[in-house]
Amino acid sequence: MRINPRAEVWVGGGLTLVAILVQPVVALAAALGWKLTRMQETDLLGLTLLGIGVGVVMVFHGFGLFGWVRRIRLQSPITLAPAGSTSIFSAQTGQVDAPRPAISLPTPVAAAKLKPARVYASVSTARLVQLAKTPNLTNAQAAALIEPYIDTWLTVEGTVENVNPPNQVVVQEADGPLSHLTCAYFGGGLNLRALQKGQPIRLAGRITGVSLGMVQLQDCEVSESGHSEPGVAG
C-alpha cells in the first residue's frame, strides 16, 4: 500500500524535527540536574541520527526527489547520451537540457604530397642500350643491369624521327659514329602535330626501361629546342 506523499512528507519532517530537538532537550535536562549515564547518552545519540536519517528519506520520497535524481543520472552524458551529443544539467531550471551537438575539433590537414626531387642519371642512352644488349644474358639479367637507373631523369638531344599519337615522340640521337632511337612519352602541353620530321629537339624524361633497343622515357618535357620551336598547345 502506497502512503500518501503529503502525509509521508509531514511524518518525515516531524520525525526529523523531533530527532533534532532530542539533543537540546537532553542538554536542558542535564542543566536542570537530570544526569544520564554514558550508555544512555550513546543510545540517545544513535536514536537521534536514526530518526534524522529516516525522516530525511521519507521527505525525499514524499517529494519524489529520488526519481528526479535517477532521471538526471540516466540522462547524463556519461551514460545514455547519444553519440556526438552532450546532455547538460541546467542549474536554473533544475532539469537536464536536451542533448546538444558536441563541438568537433578541426582535424589536422593532411600533408600535401610533394613530388620527389629529380635525380639525373650519369649515363647516356647509348650506354643503357649497350647494357640491355649485353651478350649471353637473360632478359632478367639484362633488366637487373638497367634497374639502378629506373626512375632517374635523363636529358636527350637529337632530331624528331617520328610522332605516334597520342603522346609518343621518337628521337634520333647521334652519339659519335653511332645513331640510335629514344622513345619519349609526353604528359601534355606539347602540340605533337606541329613537330616536323628532322626537327632538332632537346627534352628531359624519366627512365622506365629499354625496349626494342630504345630507351623509354616517361613524363617528358621539352628542355630546349634547336633552330625551330615545337608547337605548344594554346
Image: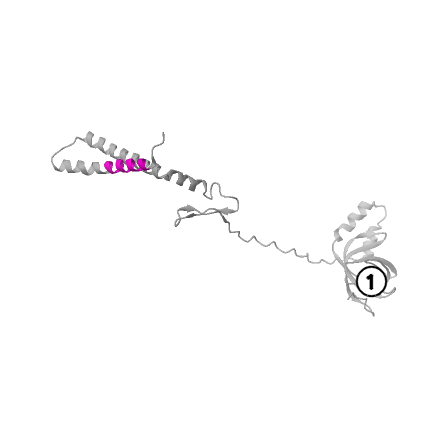
Q: Residue at x 20, y 37 (%)?
A: 23
> Residue 151: where, in percent of width, then height?
74, 54
- 65 or 40, nearer to the observer: 65
Is 7 one of the magenta-colored residues?
yes
Compared to residue 227, the image places residue 67 above or below, namely above
> Residue 185: where, in percent of width, then height?
80, 57
Q: Residues within 10 Å of mark 1 (few under 14, many from 20)?
A: many
Q: Is residue 67 left or right of residue 45?
A: right
Q: Residue at x 14, y 36 (%)?
A: 30
Q: Residue furthest bottom?
A: 227
* Magenta stretch prevailing secondary structure: helix
- 161 or 64, nearer to the observer: 64
Is 136 one of the magenta-colored residues?
no
Q: Residue furthest left?
A: 33
Compared to residue 79, the image places residue 219 above or below, namely below
For residue 125, what is the image quadrant?
Answer: bottom right
Q: Amino acid at mark 1?
A: Leu
Locate the N terminus by quadrant: top left
> Residue 145: where, in percent of width, then height?
78, 49
Q: Is residue 120 left or right of residue 21?
A: right
> Residue 118: where, in percent of width, then height?
71, 58
Q: Which segment did they paint magenta?
A: 6-19
For residue 60, what is the image quadrant?
Answer: top left
Q: Which residue is mark 1?
A: 192
- 93 or 127, nearer to the observer: 93
Q: Is residue 195 left or right of residue 7?
A: right
